[in-house]
Amino acid sequence: MKKLLSIYTLLFLLLAFTACSSDRDEPSPIQNKPEISLASGAKFTSKVGKNFTYTPTVKNASGATYIWTMNNEVIGNTQTLCHIFEEKGSYYIRLKVTNDAGSDEEEILVTVTALTPPVISLNIPDGGFNALAYTDYTFKPTFQHKEADGFTCSWSLNGNVVSNDSIYTFNQSDKGSYTIKITASNEDGENHLEFKVNVIESLLYSVTFDKLSYFCETTDRNTFIGHPVYITPTIRNFSKPTIKWVINGDTIVGANSQTLKLTPDKAGDYLIKVCVYEPSKISSSVSGIIETGNITFTNEIMIHAYNNESSAQRAINGSSSKKQNKVYEYVPAPGQFIGDTALAGFTGNETTKNAANSYALERLNKTSYVSLGGFGGYIIVGFDHSIAASANDYDFTIQGNAYASPNMGSDGNSEPGIVWVMQDVNGNGLPDDEWYELKSSETGNKSTIQNYAVTYYKPSSPNANVKWKDSEGNSGTIDYNIYHRQNSYYPTWISTTSYTLKGTRLKARNYVKDNLYINPAYGWGYADNLGKDAISSSDDGSNQVNGFKISNAILPDGTVVTLKYIDFIKVQTGLNTKSGPLGEVSTEVFSFTDYSME
């Protein structure tokens, strides 16, 4: 009985313990839905091609899934978003985080901008920089986006790194061409700029004497006793030059102007030396102020003085011709009639001076026009005798084609050419002596420019305009047009890629009236001009002739020089202008005549 009681007691205690143990168990925790926290107001920036990375803060993220979407497309499935944007713009991106208890969503805005690698800016002249040896030149380019992270700069000279600064000072002792390369980079990329520096003995400074014409082989000058010579060197790139003249070793006291007037009082040779000095501090667009020694340039010219003017005169004889018998130089400016194979006598193969002269003489002998092209274009002719100064109304004539048709009114169409004369002082039969301009109605006017120069540049391709620059700082073109279709208006017998013509320029007066381009006449003293000295004319310009007096020969200062005779005549286009589709205004000549033999 006791044994049975004990069993019941044990069972009761076991049940009681089990019941108490069950009452002490904790309930399972309740899971909450995710909560997303975004920083920076949910607005971010990135750049095209760069990796954009962002990790938001997410609460209750245990076991959660992540979905990043942009434009309804999934672009990520982890808490951290990594994405590369291919184009700039503004992009809205949504994040959805989900667990068993629910989900949360937020949106971010990413503004994507373009990459900003460095941009290097430095004004580099055509052909690079010219520099003096042993002289510092500090290059200071500007860099855009220099403030971006990771900016670096390096300079290399002929392939070797010479600086890692943003500026570089160049100084070389040896003449030659040097290649400088700038490399700039930042976190967005890299850029390069490469240019040349040409080390030369002189930094484009020069003192030169002009030849009397393009094809003349010497700068020597020839004159008779008592006939003054004006000597003016061309001085380039000096800012405040000091000038000294020396004649046969003797310094001329007080002669410190750019022009020297020499009047020989006896026959012989006069060696003229000009010395040009520049102060020690010179301004440079590359390096600011450069400390150097005085810049000194010298040049020399020879003046030959001859005794007897009368003994050199070539008299008329029974076989003498009243017309020109030779063309010494035909150097037109570019123009629509230059090189036109449609013109009689022109083959298109005139690539030498002699061939061009032969072409021009053939046309003059046929009384066909020879065009001188734009400003400064000229022709030099001679006769088989000297043309004497006389008491006649005129000593010689030049035929042109100026006209005034009824529908153009009295102004008509004139293309004035400046006329120059020369004596064969040294007797060598060549126009290498002294030119004298003939005085005319516009001589001395403020609008008339002496020693005006135009440089013409050969086009790099056919059927192109011809560019020019003048001594007044202007530029323009001789326009290619539909009426004349030769490959180029640039003379084929001028072998250089540019050439300069210098002379007297008149102020242009051309205008448009009733859709007609009018080129009014000038008073007197010009070829191809309906002035007061027009001996004959017609409505169509045929047989239009101007007369000229040797007594109108003047010196560069405008004073008259007395010449007993002349041997050479030069006509030069005196205007630098154009008349719309009609093209450049160009002087035309048809013939030259000794008026005393008419």
Image (cartoon, rainbow, N blue to C red):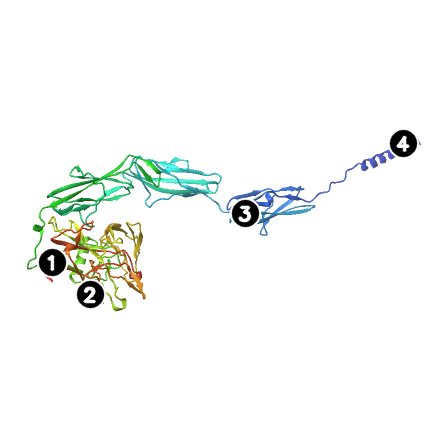
From the image, which quarter does the N terminus lie in?
A: top right
Q: Quadrant of residue 415?
A: bottom left
> Quick check: 51 left or right of 257?
right
Label 1: element kind: loop
**How many numbered marks does the figure carry?**
4
Q: Position of residue 497 (x, y in %)?
A: 26, 50
Q: CA distance from mark 1 to mark 4?
A: 176 Å
Callout 1 crowding tier (Cα within 10 Å): few <14, some 14–19, many ≥20: few
Q: Position of residue 377 (x, y in %)?
A: 23, 55
Please identify, in this view, whether the residue under mark 2 or under mark 4 is nearer the observer: 2
Residue 430: x percent and y percent? 14, 51
The residue indicated by pointer 3 is: 111
Per the model, the C-alpha gap separating discs 2 and 1 is 24 Å
Give the CA distance from mark 3 to mark 2. Answer: 79 Å
Q: Give the distance between the C-alpha atoms of the residues marked 4 and 3, in whole angstroms.
A: 84 Å
Q: Secondary structure at mark 4?
A: helix
Mark 1 and 3 residues: CB-CB less than 8 Å, in contact?
no
Nearer the observer, disc 2 or disc 1?
Answer: 1
Which residue is outermost to the top?
2
Residue with the mark numbered 1: 391
Q: Amino acid at mark 1?
A: Ala
Question: Whole-percent x and y of residue 449?
Answer: 25, 52
- Residue type at tag 2: Ser
Density class for disc 3 (Cα within 10 Å; few <14, some 14-19, many ≥20) is: some
Residue that carries the numbered disc 4 in the rendered image: 6
Q: Earlier in the sequence, mark 4 or mark 3?
A: 4
Q: Residue at x 15, y 57 (%)?
A: 549
Which comes sooner in the sequence, label 1 or label 4?
4
Q: Which residue is mark 2?
A: 537
Amino acid type, callout 3: Thr
